[in-house]
Image (cartoon, rainbow, N blue to C red):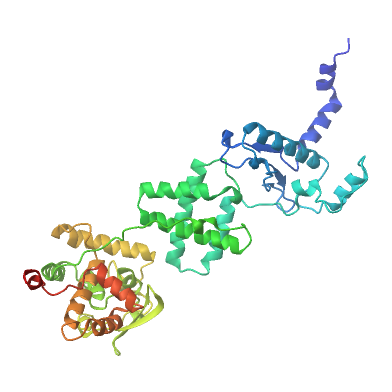
Amino acid sequence: MFNLNSYLTNEHGNEHILEHSLSKKKNYSTPKIYSANGNLKKRWYVYYSYRNPESGILQRMKNVYGGANRYNTKEDRLIVLSIYREKLLSLLNEGFNPFEDNTARYENREDKSLNPVKNTNKVPEVQLIIDSKSSVLSYKEAFIKGLKYKEKLINDTTRKGYENRLKNFLLWVEKNHPDLELITDIDKKVVMEFLNYILEETSPRNRNNYRTDLSSIMQALEDNDIISSNFIKNIPVLKALPKRNKTYSNQEQKAIFEHLETTDQTLLLFIKFISYNFLRPIEVCRLRVGDLDIKNKRIQFKAKNSPLKTKIIPDLLLKDLPDLSKLNKEHSLFTPDGLGGVWESDLNNKRDYFSKRFKRVVKDPFNLGIDYGLYSFRHTFITKLYNELVKGSSPFETKSKLMQITGHSSMKALEKYLRDIDAEFPDDYSELLTS
């Protein structure tokens, strides 16, 4: 008796046919429907991959929506997308290729149609489904590309901040939305969900920083036609209370300086650059030996609000400086081992190093709270200077002189700073209340 199963599986020639068929790489994946687990608030679509002719790798193509998301029931959406899925599969089987111009294939297909009449004003259904420009980047590829666009426009510290926040965002998406793949899958709802997560875990200020960095990268993608629009810029900024470092009293400041004279003179000199030259801690960390011109009593540094700023070195600081003439001008001025040396470290790490050193040497022994830090010395000495200047001048004249010394970019910025640190106090008004 003839057994068909045995013949199919045992016939010697069939083994070669089967082996040859399996060895051929398929150029596309079977189209599938993404239904968001039945969530009608998300976009549903048909998705598939096609083999990139250059890389030889299956590459995810543009989603096919087909107007399905206009329908408000699961059944209606599935009906629409099922039709598109079958139509797409049929076109792929016929040889339509998203990496090629399919015009000839379409015209040949129409010629074979039972209805030879063509409507030249109508966009062919083939082009609605198979688009030669339909390749869309994954969200990971797109964001990394966007970051590269920004790299030339930002400094190294800002770039590292972007990288860190972007890494956290990508990890969060991968964990909480594993179904998302393309940059077009990242919408306002996803980003808002992430920003709310950051807000719950940290603070409004940190949430706003994430919003700013992600929006900046998305804007680069919009500017380079990778996405149609940057929706993140329309997400509102939350009001965040600024973190403030308290001002030291005269007694506290003098006691700290006296303590450092005998315990850590390098840290004391670091603090004097903040106190007498009104530099920010990160600006002191940037200083190289060659940035100090001792002969002309000048110092050059990269400030927060300008690429390069020059200030005088006051005699009060100058007399505390050791001889720097024999040090390499390209070396860091401050290092963990003292003045002048090679310190290969990230700028933020340098600042963090001195903050931790200050905590160990000063904050812990003096039992100072979280509101006191290296930045507090800048507030302390600007307050001192303002109170001395205002004794012989009007408030406006005082602020004009102070702005030259502190390096604030505008009178408005200086006035806001003075308000924030409570540098301005009125005279005693007791008489006005008792008259």
Whole-percent x and y of residue 105?
86, 48
Whole-percent x and y of residue 152?
53, 69
Q: In this view, does 224 lie above or below 198?
A: below
Image quarter where the N terminus lies is top right
Q: In this view, does 27 lie above or below 313?
A: above
Quarter of the image where one finds residue 407: bottom left
Image quarter where the C terminus lies is bottom left
In this rendering, does residue 24 appear at all?
A: no
Question: In this view of the protein, which residue sits in the foreground, 56 or 108?
Answer: 108
Residue at coordinates 48% horizontally, 50% vertically from top-left?
169
- Residue projecting furthest to the bottom: 296
Is 202 situated left or right of 90 in this image?
left
Counting labels gives 0
In this rendering, does residue 309 appear at all?
A: yes
Quarter of the image where one finds residue 22: top right
Whole-percent x and y of residue 341?
33, 72
